[in-house]
Amino acid sequence: MDDHPGGDEVLLSATGKDATNDFEDVGHSDSAREMMDKYYIGEIDASTVPTKRTYTPPQQAQYNPDKTPEFLIKILQFLVPLLILGLAFVVRHYTKEK
């Protein structure tokens, strides 16, 4: 893909389908056609190609209505620094020379 003169986007847009028309529409040079012969694998059996793709949605995590772990983490991210700061003030107050 890195060596393709048209870039990798052209190749990726033709993946998973018969790219013959895409190849012919561009008007490749003779050297490109010779190179194609080197990488040619074979003909596509049209009976094995699905006529329509079906969309399969990705698996989603279960809905957690109370979101307890996330809420607890957010509270701790706020409270722990405040507790450390408060402890620092208490230590400073009691260790300060009079």
Image: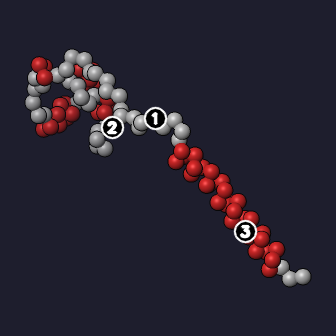
Q: Nearer the viewer, residue 57 or 89?
A: 89
Could one spot residue 61 in this view of the protein? Answer: yes
Badge 2 or badge 1: first in the primary sequence: 2
Left or right: residue 95 versus residue 65 is: right
Residue 19: quarter of image: top left
Q: Position of residue 41 (x, y in %)?
A: 11, 34
Q: Tell me the number on the disc at residue 8.
A: 2
Q: Which residue is mark 3?
A: 87
Left or right: residue 13 versus residue 47 is: right
Tell whether label 3 touches label 1 (CB within 8 Å). Answer: no
Q: Tell me the number on the disc at residue 50.
A: none
Q: Could you classify mark 3 by the number of other residues whose Cα lies within 10 Å: few (under 14), some (14-19), or many (20 or more)?
A: few
Measured in 3D between alpha carbons, the distance from the residue under mark 1 to the one under mark 3, in whole angstroms, is 38 Å
Callout 1 secondary element: loop
Q: Amino acid at mark 3?
A: Leu
Callout 3 secondary element: helix
Q: Which residue is mark 1?
A: 63
Could one spot residue 28 in this view of the protein? Answer: no
Q: Quadrant of the N terminus?
A: top left
Q: Amino acid at mark 2?
A: Asp
Measured in 3D between alpha carbons, the distance from the residue under mark 3 to the one under mark 2, in whole angstroms, is 57 Å
Colouring chosen for the image of the structure = secondary structure
Q: Nearer the viewer, residue 69 or 45?
A: 69
